[in-house]
Amino acid sequence: MNYKSLLILISFLSLMGTRALAQDSAIERTFHESGKINVVVAVVVVIFIGLIFYFVRLEKKISKIEKDIKN
Amino acid sequence: MFIKNLFHLVRHELKLEMKQKHFLSSIVLYIVSTIFVCSLSFTSIEDTKIWNALFWIIILFSLTNAISKSFLNENSDKQLFLYTLINPRVLILGKILYNLVLSVFLVLLSFFVFNFFIQSDGLKDINFSLFLLAVVLGSMSISSTLTMVSAIASKTNNNIGILSILAFPILIPSLLLSIQFSNLAINGGTAEMATQFIVFLSLINLLIIILSFLLFPYLWRE
Amino acid sequence: MKAIKKHWWKALAVLLLVYTLLFSFLVPLSPTIKSASPSSLEIGDNRIVLTGYNTNFQEGETIDASIEFGKKTLICGKNIKVLSPNMISAEFNIPEALPSKILHVRLKTNRFSSFSPELVKAYSIKVNNDTSNLCIANNAMATSTPLDIPNRLQLNETIRNLMFHVPMWFTMMLIFTISFVYSMKYLRTFDLKYDIIAREAVNIGLLFAFLGLITGMIWAKFTWSEHTDLFTTKGWWVNDVKLNGAAITTLIYIAYLILRNSLNSDQQKAKVSAVYNIFAFVLMIVFIMILPRLQDSLHPGNGGNPAFGKYDLDSTLRMVFYPAVLGWMLLGVWMLSLKKRFANLENTLIDEL
């Protein structure tokens, strides 16, 4: 893990540690409205991002190989 | 022949241990000083659950320290010569057996030292024989896992660091079982109540030994 | 023709996943009564307002509301009024003595029937077995059973996550099993092409493990946790057997990758990591079978059952859950085959250069 991502992780954790100012912020409310449908949306989005992440990594590897062939 | 070789090997390991006393004394000192540091911050623990958890954590780390060395000497020429002569299956069984003896000794020692330094009032109704069984069975499964994993880790450069990374996730479940088991014994449980734990822990022990027996020759072959 | 023979399972994966997505977002939740207010009853006339979810009441619709005990109708509701599509009110005349202390309102229309949450008694009800004041309210008959997803307590719409969160674990287990099998094959033949599959399978399996962990954390936060505010560390991690099992699995395979990275030659990497893979996988499977039998779990099928209980899935959910699992599994295998082919190409290229 490099320095930058460690910094992001630490800042994220400290953000989680300090409670939000408002007790019931707008984001929280959206997750509880209408039968918590947005929890499902969040889950689907996470899976989608995960799959995209996989594609990006594969693409990086392929471009590296392409570069090697050219040289 | 197989059994004979096995006992020769275990005896050889024990002899080696007795000769180089610094290893055993260093691990004993490690245990005593760890427990002493704990006693400075705890002195007495009311909650038996915490007492138990602390005890097992100390066991886990001292056994990791003790067993991580079991494949370290392997590179010296004399040892290499010995190992070319015998079957690798004999070797791993010998190592596991030796480490079982060592870990049971270390665990019993740390129990007495721990009990000496850190008292707990909750230990009044402890079922002592069952607790000993829990400790022995638990430490056996920990030490046999650690032996096999240290054989794996000895192939890398960073032996001890890799050992704990590889071994701890596999150890968590049997550690959980042992902690629950010894908790039951501390609260005065009977052997009938602990049948489940005894069966599961023995099965895990058996399984680890069988797996090491089957897999170790692949590691050994160059 | 050849292309179909070769690629049919990829098309199947896409079809199954499209079906899963459409089904799990288009099929509505079954109509249910969410709350009854006031939730306490008194002797005499009570006007109770029932709030529903997806109920869609209409003026002039035949609606029966009754207080039930077991399968017997005790008190029929009178003066049923539709206040809004999700709200209805009814009057109940409560006598002094009832055969039970546990009371629910049952709502029945031509489209569905549903029970309300339990009503609290504001006075102490005398229990008698007198069932002479039974009423018969059978105006409404459920004529057709519409296609809907069950609306469970606490879960509500999040039950749809069953088609996304749970298959992640199934896929992960399949892919790690593939890795295990190819590690064994490698140790039998010492052919590096098997090692490539074992390694890539661990990579893909870890992706699914992380997806399963993150989606599970989100789902758990909003169903099991009392700490509903997002910006605390509380409630994201529940001390649950299945979560611990998942965490252990993830740690084991991260350790596998670290072990690979700390070895030097390819043969050494392949051999040592195959040994660790087999050792860890067998133990992990044993623990996953054993541990849930020792502790209770918040997950369905808890208390001695490592999988689902018989009653946790109804027929509608089965219709989409099994295809979803198969679809995600095929997708995982597809990703694995891409990664494998890529790694093979990479190896031949390195050999040539």
Image (spheres, helix red, strand yellow):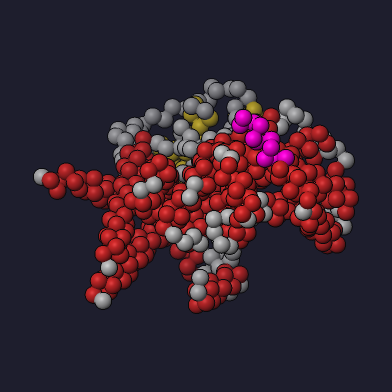
Q: In the image shown, does B82 or C193 lie closer to the viewer?
A: B82
Q: In which quadrant of the rendered image does the C terminus of chain C lie?
A: bottom left
Q: Which residue is found at the position 33% from the left and 69% from the top?
A: A60
Q: In the image shown, does B46 or B79 lie closer to the viewer?
A: B79
How many numbered dots are placed on residues in this image? Answer: 0
- Whether residue B20 is visible, yes or no, is yes
Image location (x, y in percent) of residue B215: 51, 42
Q: Which residue is found at the position 60% from the left and 59% from the top?
A: B159
Image location (x, y in percent) of residue B61: 70, 54
Q: Is residue B5 magenta?
A: yes
Image location (x, y in percent) of residue B155: 54, 55
In the image: residue C179, left or right of residue B163: left
Q: Which residue is found at the position 76% from the left and 45% from the top?
A: B15
Q: In the image shown, does C142 or C275 lie closer to the viewer?
A: C275
Q: What is the magenta range?
A: B1-11
In the image: residue B178, left or right of residue A17: right
Query: Quick one: which residue is furthest to the left in this view?
Result: C1
- Compared to residue B205, the image places residue B113 above or below, namely below
Magenta region, main secondary structure: helix
Q: Is residue C89 magenta?
A: no
- Compared to residue C38, the image places residue A69 above or below, namely below
Q: Which residue is found at the position 89% from the left and 50% from the top?
A: B116
- Whether residue C234 is visible, yes or no, is no
In the image: residue B187, left or right of residue B84: right
- Compared to residue C253, the image places residue B212 above or below, namely above
Q: In which quadrant of the rendered image does the N terminus of chain C lie?
A: top left
